[in-house]
Amino acid sequence: MDEVFFSYPRADRAAVLPLVAALRAAGVGVFLDESGIDEFEGITDKIRSALAGARLFVAYYSATYPTRPACQWELLTAFRAAVALGRASERILVINPEPVVDHVQPVQLQDARYGIITDPESATRLVERIVARVKGSPGCLGDAIASKRPVWRPLEHLGSERFVGRVDEFWQLHQALHSFEYLATQDGAAAGQAVVMGLGGVGKTLLVEQYARRFAAFYPGGIYWFTSAASHTPDAPAPDGGQADVLAQHYQQVAAALALDSAALGRVQVREAARQRIETINEPCLWIVDDVPGELSPGAVRELAAPHPLGRTVMTTRWRGYQLPIVDVDVLHPNEAYRLLTATRTPNNPDEETAARTLVERLGSHALAIDLAHGCLADQPGLTFIELLGQLADTRDGDAFQELVEDLYMQVPTDHTNDIAATFARSLHHLNDHALTLLRIAALLAPAPLPERLLTSISIALSDQDEPSTRRADRRALSAAQRRSLIRQTGTEPPSWFMHALVSRTLTLHPETSDLRPVLRQAALAATLRLMQTVYTPGRLDLADVMPHARALVEELDTGESLALLDSVARYDYESGQPASASHHYQRLTDARTTQLGEDHPNTLNSRNNLASAYQSAGNLGRAIPLFEQTLTDSIRVLGEDHPNTLASRNNLAGAYRTAGDLGRAIPLFEQTLTDSIRVLGEDHPNTLNSRNNLAGAYRTAGDLRRAIPLYQQTLTDSIRVLGEDHPNTLAFRNSLANAYESAGDLGRAIPLFEQTLTNRVRVLGEDHPDTLNSRNNLASAYQSAGDLGRAIPLYQQTLTDSIRVLGEDHPNTLASRNNLAGAYRSAGDLGRAIPLFEQTLTDSMRVLGEDHPNTLIFRNSLASAYESAGDLGRAIPLYQQTLTDSIRVLGEDHPNTLAFRNSLAGAYRSAGDLGRAIPLFEQTLTNRVRVLGEDHPDTLTSRNNLASAYQSAGDLGRAIPLFEQTLTDGIRVLGEDHPNTLTSRNNLASARQEAEAVQHGSTATSATEAAPQKPSTVD
């Protein structure tokens, strides 16, 4: 077995043979392949056997060496084996005949361990050095050169047999992905991740494909490939809703790659399944995310990355803002571009060669343009290089072409845009009509993977053929387009296709496409609308692959179908917890319907109502309430007082007033709605039951539990009779009654109802339904109110975990769930876990909902309260002050939340011993609560107790004791003898009286307990 494997390019054979002869004369066995290998087929069994037996791999690394794929295959195989065995530098020797080292890759070989030949003496020394290295080698490469062929998911990318060059980029990428393994090359960058970056069409995707194939042996755990584009401009920021679409679509592809049911799973569930798969295989894998759009948040980028440390992540993008190691991809070297152009046909005379090199120059060595030009030549055997060069000039006619040039220049800013555009246009000429139609459909949609189910549905609408025949015809046509590099398949289960944005723009600006556009667009709208009619369930991924295309189609509102599709997109955003995006789309829909149908059309009124609901969900009551008011006024005028839509509009306005804390206007509207619903629809109509439940909720918010609870009880009884025990509305009404019992302090009745509701919802709706998550949260809250934190905290933890998995990290309900868990940790005295959760919730809420959203204000107040509990008043008081100031500006002086925030700030001043600022705030809060909420509201009783406690702390027992007495009397009358707040009031009064007696006798006594702050309401 030969001890040395000598790797060299054929062009350097004359320089290599004397060295080999000298080594053999010195008694060293040398393997030198002189048979030749196919450049694109890797290495033969003969060479593999020779590598396994070699103790030393010698590379004659001339400037030609990196341009020869066969040499690179040999080096890569030896390098991987040497790294696996250890002491790689002792197993590989580089001979560099060039005066520089920049061409030597990988960089680990650019050190003192290479030899340079300058004269006969240096050649002799090099032979002696090789002999010594053979003797000192740790051993042969052996079985380490064997490699396991990785499995590609969802399907294998074949790359291109015409791929040329990019050796430096290959090794830069590999180094970035494995820098933590090569200590000499670490630079502190993110380990195991890299971004491949470059202009459109420059070859980013093909580079990564080829890297995955050539370096596959480094990833025995598998190669995962996902495409993640979701906006019309790949380097533009993701639009409203776009970031959520990117993640949903990504996880849908991950689910397909793992053969999971994407329609039944949520994002975190899919990610966890992928993490477990990688961990089970327990070998390194390559995780590729192609075409990442611009300006994704750091959290979104992390979600796109591999879910396990064994995964190495590669992303391709045009966006330069991601903080990951970058591999820049530029245009091809002119010689490499020439090799690509002439890969399957060599110029047969000097004039043809000149034309070919001129083509390369005219196309600026742009990889996609060169490949399309090659495709034209390969598709037409009679077409010469000279003729193709002339046809580029012939293609560049008309305004449409000039528009294409200008458009492409924005994405490929070079002096060669005219010729690149002409090449794109020319490459489409020889597709058949069906293939062109499919590409034109793709050009209408988003530059995201196009699911076959959508494409087939559109194609059926155009052809009137049956589904199997249409699918077969489509696949044949798309395969022909793929052979010309105009489209590529990106998935198999479900099948999907992807067309490069530059090709899409070429098609869009083609005159014939403009003529066909109305027909194609109508078919696309109808097909997409049919798919979007499915009832959306939050957290599911069944519409993820359709949403980017739905959004693209509603950028223009020109038909009734486009308005209907926009309504579906807006509803999707609203249900998935994206109120800002929903508001944007509902506003567009309202404007369009107003223009096309008129202000008074029922559809226009409905759109205005939905827009107001989206504003309310986003916390923008200043815009929601006037819209609800206008909609109600117009509904009464147009439809009449008794129309069901008018009743619904009045109910919605009342709900907005309730959210704004304006119970003086909310309750009369709820009462009127219930009265009218009974008269118009009947006692047992589902809408009447909802109206009664909503009125009960308003009474509960007002603290009037004596009117709320009987209404809740009646509603539940009637719903069981009319709708049945298991109807979702019945489950909701039972949950509302349980909440009312909890508010009344009657946990003996509240907890069993919460438990029953949760059990029924799990059985009827499933573990992951949002209503089930709410039930679990409410039961945890009741356990917490009962002081049973041993049962409350695990339920809160499960709810948060499930909310993240089902709804996503950023859904408003997930944020509330995290805040509630933090509150339970705080109640348990575990501030080490509570405070970080409160901080994370506030940070996420500011990012997702905005600084002024009511929930953000609540989360800031909660964090301040945790700081206060930790004794950190230096951080607590400024947060309380900011929250109160913002709440006055956003919600108004009299909103119940503003009153609660003022009470919290007063309590912090009292904790700091600053009674001079605490007492006036407590007094102001009590005065305002009496005026706004009434004498008997539980919050008013809390304020009176807290003011009395402040007077007691100030030693003013003459004012404290009468207030404690009044609070106790009112508490017994309003809440009952056994309510926890009543018990606190009785204890505080006793403490104050004991202190008064102590003062008289010169002794001391304990001070009163401040009533607990009101926590945010649970979901009804």
Image (cartoon, helix red, strand yellow):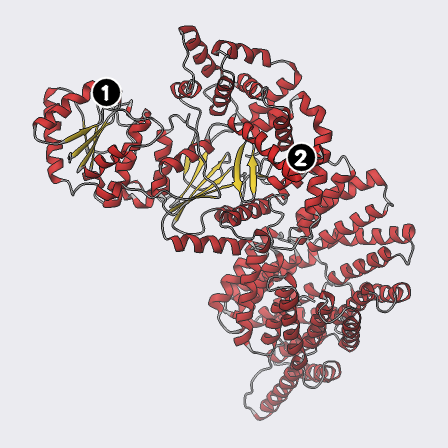
Q: Residue 804, located in which quarter of the rendered image?
A: bottom right
Residue type (three-letter) at the residue carrying disc 1: Asp
Which SS class for mark 1? helix
CA distance for labels 1 and 2: 56 Å
Q: Residue 633, which numbered label?
A: none
Please provide percent x and percent y for residue 915: 60, 72
Q: Is residue 239 visible?
A: no
Q: Which residue is drawn at the image coordinates 64% and 61% (left, top)?
A: 770
Please provide percent x and percent y for residue 894: 74, 63
Q: Nearer the viewer, residue 84 or 563?
A: 84
Q: Is residue 157 above or below residue 652?
A: above
In the rendered image, the quadrant that contains the C terminus is: bottom right
Of circles 1 and 2, the one toward us is 2
Q: Which residue is mark 1?
A: 12
Please provide percent x and percent y for residue 865: 56, 67
Q: Is residue 918 visible?
A: yes
Q: Which residue is mark 2?
A: 459
Tag count in the figure? Answer: 2
Please provide percent x and percent y for residue 284: 37, 48
Residue sitting farthest toward the bottom: 1001
